[in-house]
Amino acid sequence: MKIDWAALGSVFGVSLVSTIGLVGLFTLGIVALAKQESAASGSAGSSGGSVALARTGAYACFGLCAAAVAYGIYLIVA
């Protein structure tokens, strides 16, 4: 039995980078939701634009996470 170490290392590297990226993107979404809640309940001078921007950013992060997971499932099935 011969192991192709270069291919194994390549798969490990891509898996590591994509996992860190996906977790980081999801974390950014959670942070954006937390900022949206703090801006909504914070000072009376906070604008509605920052709340909408935080919500939009959070939804974009979660949407990108869902797209990455769907693409991974597509690669496994296809």
Image (tube, helix red, strand yellow):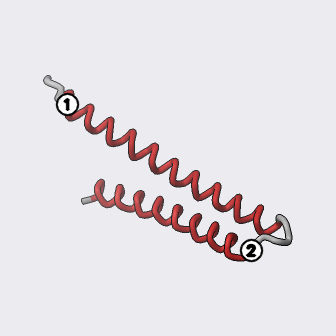
Q: Residue furthest front?
A: 45
Please tell me whether residue 75 is drawn above or below residue 8 in the rendered image: below
- Name the secondary structure under disc 1: helix
Which residue lies at the image location 64% right of the left edge and 60% below the top edge?
Answer: 32
Which residue lies at the image location 43% right of the left edge and 44% below the top edge?
Answer: 19
What amino acid is at disc 1?
Answer: Ala
Badge 2 is on which residue?
47
The mark total stands at 2
Q: Is residue 26 left or right of residue 9?
A: right
Please tell me whether residue 45 is drawn above or below residue 25 in the rendered image: below
Q: Quadrant of residue 7?
A: top left
Residue 29 in the image, given as x and y percentages of width and height: 58, 58
Q: Name the foreground residue: 51 vs 70.
A: 51
Residue 51 in the image, given as x and y percentages of width and height: 69, 71
Q: Is residue 5 left or right of residue 73?
A: left
Q: Quadrant of residue 45?
A: bottom right
Q: Name the foreground residue: 58 vs 73.
A: 58
Q: Residues within 10 Å of mark 2 (few under 14, many from 20)?
A: few
- Name the secondary structure under disc 2: loop
Choose the circle earlier in sequence order: 1 or 2: 1
Residue 39 in the image, given as x and y percentages of width and height: 76, 65
Q: Is residue 37 left or right of residue 16?
A: right
Badge 1 is on which residue?
6
Q: Quadrant of residue 17?
A: top left
Label disc, if present, on residue 39 of the rendered structure: none
What amino acid is at disc 2?
Answer: Ser
Residue 4 in the image, given as x and y percentages of width and height: 17, 29
Q: Is residue 66 left or right of residue 9?
A: right
Q: CA distance from mark 1 to mark 2?
A: 53 Å
- Mark 1 vs mark 2, foreground winner is 2
Q: Name the foreground residue: 70 vs 62.
A: 62
